[in-house]
Image: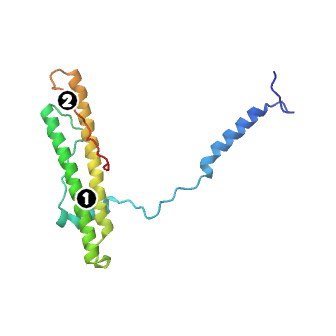
Amino acid sequence: MMARMSPKGVHPMRTACVAAIVWLAALPALAQAVEPAGDYRTCSAEMSEQGRGVVAEACGTLAVPDFTGVEFQSLEELQAGEAMRDSFVMDVGIYGRCVSEVITSRLQHEGPEDGFDADKAACAHSWAEEEATEVVRSFGRACVAYADRSIIDMRIRPYDGPCYPAVKDGEG
């Protein structure tokens, strides 16, 4: 069975394919720019820092552990880091509840006109959550590196536990 050719000798399927490719290539140019959804806002570093200052008296400050580039040398060192990570994640939860209570209390009792900036305070909570995420990630990378080394190097006591915390329903 021979394929039918158009009068000019071009196969109709080829023409359809070329047209489809040209149309698909033009789609990104036809797309609408993505607009921010509703009142969704992000916090600048400056606004987050100001927010931490706003809530510091009531909620204290957080000492953020840094596991970036850490290479655990022993199982005990890894376990100490794990305890530090878990403690920080718990502190962030407490800090977040405190920030929420400060915002609610100030807005209920004093109102927005007293100069209190709820957005800045909320940015402090957002900052803390982002820091907790980075602490979990950086500890996890260091933990996986230790576990990998412990398989190869018999001098290192093996670690076969989880490098990332389990997330319970309703969290994370």
Badge 1 density bin: few <14, some 14–19, many ≥20, Cα 10 Å? many
Distance between mark 2 and mark 1 Cα atoms: 32 Å
Residue 124 in percent (x, y) is at: 27, 60
Picture residue at 24% right of the left edge, 40% below the top: 139
Badge 2 density bin: few <14, some 14–19, many ≥20, Cα 10 Å? some
Residue 74 shows in the view: no
Q: Residue furthest right?
A: 7
Picture residue at 67% right of the left edge, 44% below the top: 23
Q: Earlier in the sequence, mark 2 or mark 1?
A: 1
Instruction: Describe the element under mark 2 as helix, strand or loop.
Output: loop
Which of the 4 quarters of the picture holds residue 79? Answer: top left
Q: Image check: 84 left or right of 118?
A: left
Residue 134 in percent (x, y) is at: 28, 46
Instruction: Describe the element under mark 1 as helix, strand or loop.
Output: helix
Residue 113 in percent (x, y) is at: 31, 79
Q: Amino acid at mark 2?
A: Tyr
Picture residue at 67% right of the left edge, 39% below the top: 21
Does the CB distance between marks 2 and 1 fall below 8 Å?
no
On screen, 83 above or below 43? Answer: above
Which of the 4 quarters of the picture holds residue 49? Answer: bottom left
Q: Amino acid at mark 1?
A: Gly
Q: Any mark on residue 159, and which?
A: 2
Residue 37 in percent (x, y) is at: 47, 60
Q: Any mark on residue 96, and which?
A: 1
In the picture, which quadrant includes the N terminus? top right
Q: Nearer the viewer, residue 90 or 57?
A: 90
Q: Nearer the viewer, residue 167 or 30?
A: 167
On screen, 99 above or below 25? Answer: below
Which of the 4 quarters of the picture holds residue 33? Answer: bottom right
